[in-house]
Image: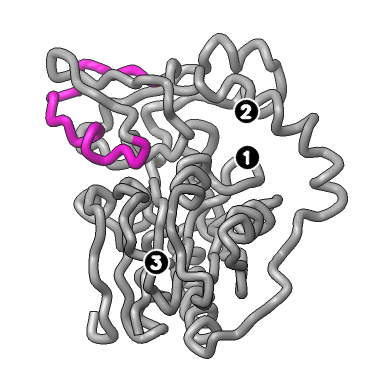
Amino acid sequence: MKKVIFCFSGTGNSLRAARIIAKQIGGAQIVSVKKDAASSLAADADMIGFICPVYEWDIPETMKDFAEKLTVNKQAYIFMVATYIAIHGRCFETMDAVLREKGARLHYGKALRCVASQCIAYEPFPFPRLMVPYSDRRAKSIGKRIAARKTNRYPRMSPVTRKRYDKAMTPFLNVQHEYDKGFYTSDKCVGCGLCSKLCPCRNITLSDRRPVWNHHCIGCNACVVYCPSKAILFRTPEAYEKLDNVVTRRLGLPEKRTRYHNPHITAKDIIADSEEVTTDA
């Protein structure tokens, strides 16, 4: 049986979940959504998974674009796991709609609470030393249900969140292309180029050995949290200052702010385009 999991991960929570679930289902190929979506990896797969974080109460745009271009086996068992902290929004509905356009459907969907890792806004919470083991246990439980090919009525956006979506999220989505104008580097930058290799959106290039952000950023923060010299900093972009709400007023990256990434996931793991996980992994 061919099993493939497509994963988008910035700070490692989703990749960690993908590895645990892959092991529970008897092994699977984990493929980063950076890989060319025109490939036929899912065309003959018997089990297909999508694992990603929730951004702006939906799936990351990078994951959506990838899924829309992907060829899938219509008869495959398809699941999705969304890593989040508070609101999963319409992420499962979005993925199911993409699949139904292809004549397939989402059989199983589950939201998995993980450490909130938006370091440009706040310290990681809940405490990683407690939350990481909890998330791992939940991922194992979810993986067992997927291995048994369970189906469910995946989580829908709540009526309250649906009512608030346009007012709460649309202003951010309208200026998202301005987000990475907040990034800059300090004199600690050694020009290693790791940030460029890490970026799952392929948004960072180098100029005179310094990173340049090219305005396709979706705020995963991989470049920030894995920078070996903590040289990448952030100030609130002008477009976000104009929104003038409680979230944008908190944006910034003090030197003492914890740059969290999942402790089980390295920069090398994020950079890899794919990996094979077996039951012995």
Residue type at mark 3? Ala
The N terminus lies in which quarter of the figure?
A: bottom left
Tag 1 secondary structure? loop
Q: Is residue 200 left or right of residue 121?
A: left
Residue bearing the label numbered 2: 173
Q: How crowded is mark 3: few (under 14 residues within 10 Å), some or many (20 or more)?
A: some
Query: Residues at badges 1 and 2 in contact (C-beta under 8 Å)?
Result: yes
Image point (24%, 21%), residue name: 211
Residue bearing the label numbered 3: 43
Tag 2 secondary structure? helix
Q: Distance between the residues labelled 1 and 2?
A: 8 Å
- Asked if 67 appears above or below 246 in the picture, the reply is below
- Asked if 161 appears above or below 48 in the picture, the reply is above
**Which stretch appears magenta?**
183-201
Residue bearing the label numbered 1: 56
Q: Splitting the image into 4 quarters, where does residue 43 fall?
A: bottom left
Observer-side mark, 2 or 3, equals 3
Residue type at mark 1? Glu
Q: How crowded is mark 2: few (under 14 residues within 10 Å), some or many (20 or more)?
A: some
Q: In this view, does 187 lie to the left or right of 59?
A: left
Q: Which of 190 and 275 is in front in this view?
A: 275
Image point (25%, 33%), residue name: 195
